[in-house]
Image (tube, grey):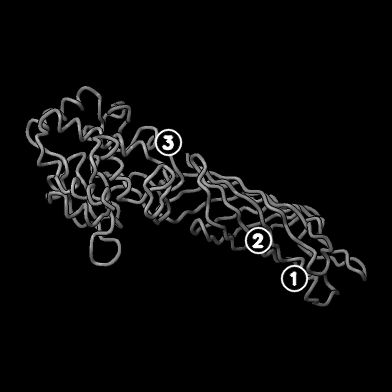
Amino acid sequence: MFLFLAAGVFAAVPIQDRSLHGAQAAEARLKVISAAQSYIGTPYRYGGISRGGLDCSGLVFLSFRDALNHTIPRTSANIYTWAEKISTAELQPGDLVFFVTTGKDVSHLGIYTGEGMFIHSASEGPRTGVMYSSLDESYWKRTYLGAGRALPWDAAAAEAMTAAIDAGRMGAVNGDTNGTAYGGNFDQGGSSSSQRNKLVWTDPGFFAGFSAAWTWGGFIEGAPSLFRGFTTVATVGCKWSEYRAGVELRPEWDFALGVFRLPITLSIGTDALQVFGGPAYTFGDPSLSLSGGERSYSGGGEWLWEVGISGAFPRIEIGPGALSLYSDLAWQPYHWEDGENFSFKPDFTANFRLSTGFRYLWRF
């Protein structure tokens, strides 16, 4: 308890009130940014204060401790109280930005890195953990509270920072993607070159993907085995915000009907849920083997159509893309041959498909 109180008293002494000016102030800011950047990819963990997991204030706390061997307050609210308040127009790399994401008081913060970007540990959203975000993003613009200064800034510090940028030690302000700061590479958005030049799944833009799934049978008439067939999907599309749309080629082997289908579909939705539909050509003559004999259907050698819905479990981001377990429910409009009467179980079997498998979508 004594050590905790002692740390709190020490943290109450603002760094900006110390004799740290000019090149030393600029150097301190670069060190803090570089320290924060070293935690990129660390997962979010409430109350976390290690590379095993960090919350937003834990990231700022460790960045100052690692870079300057200085203990600052531990929570977002206490850091907000401790920091010197400045206007957004005064923001410089190494300053702090604060947000009200829950309730009415400050609940989130990050370290500003220049050009409207900041590094922070996000707890929710399409991506979580330590990463870079933009103050121009709608969510952060809506929840932005204000800016704070924990490190000195004066004309001499500005001159030293400009010199560091010109020397290629930091590209967060002037857009030099080859600049480094204490081993950390920064681009014009303030993120590391290795982090931002490498596309990640949540970035907007074009994507491609491949899926493979098992088609189930065994619980409806005419498909006595658990294995009814196999389906794959090759897709290209465009992703924006949390939504995406794509064109898909869906080769399907249906052993219950004895046919091969080739649907060409359009899909639209989110990572968790999409709808799809389009024309589908059937190779072979569809028929089911029933206890009373064969039941034949029309549609072989013709273009019909396929519609469906696809749902996925939360993705696992791997490299520039995302892997997920998914399931399709699809419908193909085969019709029983002339002279046959409607029979629910086999006719439902012929038209309905349930598939489960894995898909990987990647950015390019």
- At a point 51% along the width and 58% down the height, the residue shown is 268
- 82 w.r.t. 142: above or below: above
Label 1 amino acid? Phe
- In this picture, residue 273 sits left or right of residue 239: right
Q: Please name the amino acid that badge 2 sits on.
A: Trp
Q: CA distance from mark 1 to mark 2?
A: 16 Å
Q: Earlier in the sequence, mark 1 or mark 2?
A: 2
Observer-nearest of 337 and 21: 21
Quadrant of res 176: top left
State the CA–CA distance, disc 3 to disc 1: 46 Å
Most foreground residue, 360 or 275: 360
Say whether disc 3 or disc 1 marks the residue closer to the N-terminus.
Answer: 3
Q: Nearer the viewer, mark 3 or mark 1?
A: 3
Q: Is residue 178 left or right of residue 338?
A: left
SS for tag 2?
strand
Instruction: Please give the label number shown on residue 348.
Output: 1
> Which secondary structure, mark 1?
helix
Q: Marks 3 and 1: CB-CB under 8 Å?
A: no
State the residue position of label 3.
Answer: 198
Q: Earlier in the sequence, mark 3 or mark 2?
A: 3
Dot 3, crowdedness within 10 Å: few (<14), some or many (≥20)?
some
Question: What label does residue 305 carry, if any?
Answer: 2
Residue 34 image point, x, y percent: 29, 34
Q: Secondary structure at mark 3?
A: loop
Tell me the distance, in whole angstroms, between the alpha carbons under discs 3 and 2: 38 Å
Outermost residue, right side:
292
Front residue of 128 and 277: 128
Q: Residue at x 19, y 46 (%)?
A: 11
Asked if residue 119 is positioned above or below residue 295 in the image, the reply reads above
Marks 3 & 2, CB-CB < 8 Å contact: no
